[in-house]
Amino acid sequence: MSDTFNNLINATETLDEEEIINNLKIILTQGTNIEISSTDVIKTLLQINRNEILKLSTEIIAEWAKTAYNRKNLTNESIINCLMSLLDNNDVDIVFNSIRALGNICYENEEACNLVDKIGINNILMILKNDDKRNDQSLTTKVSGLLLNLISLHDGLSRTVLKNEIVPVLEKLMIKYFETFEDNQMLLTFLLTILSNLLDYFDEQNVIFSEKLCQLVVDIFKKSTNPEISVICLEIFHGQSEKDEIKALLAKEGVCELLFELIKKYKHQVNDEESRSVLKMACDLIVIILTGDDCMYMLYNNGEGQVYCNMITWLDSDDSDLLSTGILAIGNFARRDIHCIQMVKNGISKKLISLLSQYNSSTGTSDIKIQHALLSTLKNLVIPHQNKEQILQEGLIDVIYPMIKIDQYLVVFKLLGTFRMVIDGQESAALDLISRVDFLERLVYWCYNSDHLGVRGEVPRLLAWLIKNCHSFKPFEKFVFVKDTVRCVVEMIASNHSVMQNEAFYAIKLLFIGCCSSTNNVESSDTLIEKLIEEVINADIGKHLNFVINKYGEKMDQHSVDNLVALLEQILSFKSATKHLKSANISKVIEKMSLNPNIQNASDKFHKITTVLNE
């Protein structure tokens, strides 16, 4: 073979075209397993203006470029420039071979892709655009593969092709070859993968992923039995599924139902990381689609929707991803009270509580995901007032209470929200929980030892709701003596959320009223009310009231104004507390309240408060 190659070199030096053709044919016949150390002969061959030589030369280059060693040596600006120029040749075989050569040279070769970008890819794109002028799709398939190689390694080329309006071209080609789907699956795979890779740049380049284009991908997804094509379609859907119009189209076109059937068909073949990743993506897509309100309502269909029924079956799955997806999907369906009420009547909450009892002390990663999903869904189900009593009777508190030992704060956040929702208006449940010292201590621990902002915000709200809903002053005797419980509620006064401010005003007001009304002995020598006053002063209630009145006093709603005034009345009934408020300069900022029209309903009380503060 080396003799033949040397003969080729000699022939090119003398420009003996017949000898060149003869040696090129011998190389192709005997094999192309040659390591190219010098590219001079190739450059010469590509400059010869004879189609037969160009055809044979480009075919050989394509073969030589299959090895990493030759690919590196062929990464030459002059060679790539010649090959790119040949894409304009009238001989289809030369164009085809040139595309093959470029594709093999650029395979996993960023340097070669940079050279293509430098030279420009207009003639590559033109081949795609001129597809309708050809009777054979092989050239379109080959150039699509080349384009895919290029954009996979070069961000700049992805932007360039988008600027050259490649998306309408891809759409036109997919529509055309969809009609002969079975014969053109490789081409469609290339086109879909190009589209998938370009989607990351759509927003940046102001390109729209239209519903028409999405519908086309859906049609391909429905028709295909090719797993590779199905996965690419899935990636496209997943990447665009945050858009409401895309979610709605996917829901309407039955993508969730199809995904369920595909998972059912292939789940037993999920045995490695790659296949597991695809399964998770399919599951995620179902959940994401259901985050759309219209999608959720359509697919629930009064509890008879196929997707809803399918998700219920996954509650019995032994696959953690399918189980968590089923739970999260049910949670998304449970965003309407009417759905929640129907689900609880049909035993869904009981099923979920039973499931949670199997996971309420687990610490494994997959188990934590299931805990999070179960708590999210149960929290939604207990929101309607009609559901609370039944879910409590089904044992929710007993099942979630052991979870207070958990330190996984994403789960803790959902746990706190579930506790808070289920005690709303449920006196006995609230009284039970607020009477448990270990529970109060754990809440305080989470409040001051978590870096999760949601947890730190939920703890004081839960404490405030316990105070409000227990309808008893008796547990206050324990509450104020648990370290930092009062402080936790007091600090919520300075929240930037008006709802939380109001909850803090009301809860602290109730603590004052309750502690003043208590006639029982307490563990310390101080009276209960003195302990409360000590706690609110230590929590610097004056500073927090100064902040909230100064920032929000002029625009507080009626409920907040009324509860703040009532709280100030309680505090100012005690000398030490009054002294504390005066030292916090409440008298200066309180004047802002006079500008709030909602203060008129409590003008007499407000006047007395300002008088005391200014004494």
Image (cartoon, helix red, strand yellow):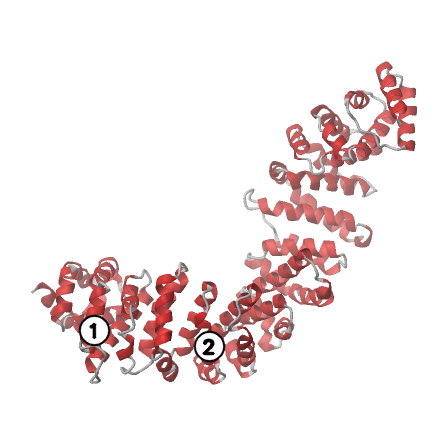
Residue 464 against residue 236 in the figure, above or below: below
- Quarter holding the N terminus? top right
In percent of width and height, residue 464 lies at 32, 72
Alpha-carbon span between mark 1 and mark 2: 36 Å
Q: Quadrant of residue 585?
A: bottom left
Label 2 crowd (10 A; few <14 / some 14-19 / many >=20): many
Residue 543 against residue 340 in the figure, above or below: above
Residue placed at 67% from the left, 28% from the top? 119
Element type where label 2 sits in the image: loop
Give whichever of discs 1 and 2 has the lower sequence position.
2
Residue 190 against residue 92 in the figure, above or below: below
Residue topped by disc 1: 531
Please identify the residue farthest to the left as the structure is shown: 615
Q: Is residue 191 left or right of residue 137?
A: left
Q: Is residue 354 left or right of residue 195?
A: left
Element type where label 1 sits in the image: helix
Q: Nearer the viewer, mark 1 or mark 2?
A: 1
Residue placed at 66% from the left, 35% from the top? 110
- Quarter holding the C terminus? bottom left
Residue topped by disc 2: 382
